[in-house]
Image (tube, helix red, strand yellow):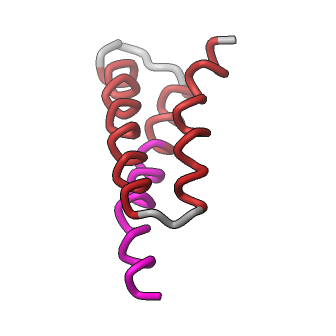
Amino acid sequence: MIFSFWAVPLIFFSFFLHKKSIKGYQSYAFILLLYFMLSSLRVFGVPNPLPFDITELILVVLAFINALFGPKNINSN
């Protein structure tokens, strides 16, 4: 239940990514910054973070990098 509530913004903005909208990528990157903030608190704010939290942090960083380079690929096409 909590996971579905947590994933709704990502699913919602993924539709804008498929439309290849630059504003969609900007909004997606902003939402990912919020996810990064909460994930980094769970990884770096506790003595022994869970492997799932570390994996989540890595995936959020990779998705953010994708959101940064997505508009560059839109403009080059």
Q: Nearer the viewer, residue 62 or 18?
A: 18
| Quadrant of the drawing holding the N terminus | top right
Instruction: Locate residue 3: give its quadrant.
Output: top right
Q: Position of residue 70 (x, y in %)?
A: 43, 68
Q: Is residue 40 above or below residue 28?
A: above
Q: Residue furthest right?
A: 1
Q: Main secondary structure of the magenta part?
A: helix
- In the picture provided, is 34 more to the left or to the right than 1? left
Q: Residue at x 51, y 44 (%)?
A: 59
Q: Residue furthest bottom?
A: 77
Q: Nearer the viewer, residue 12 or 58?
A: 12
Q: Is residue 3 magenta?
A: no
Q: Residue at x 32, y 20 (%)?
A: 41
Instruction: Locate residue 19: give its quadrant.
Output: bottom right
Q: Is residue 25 above or below residue 32?
A: below
Q: Residue at x 50, y 26 (%)?
A: 53
Q: Position of residue 46 (x, y in %)?
A: 34, 13
The magenta region covers 60-77
Q: How many marks?
A: 0
Q: Nearer the viewer, residue 72 or 45?
A: 72
Q: Position of residue 68 (x, y in %)?
A: 35, 61
Q: Residue at x 59, y 29 (%)?
A: 8
Instruction: Locate residue 35: give its quadrant.
Output: top left
Q: Is residue 73 magenta?
A: yes
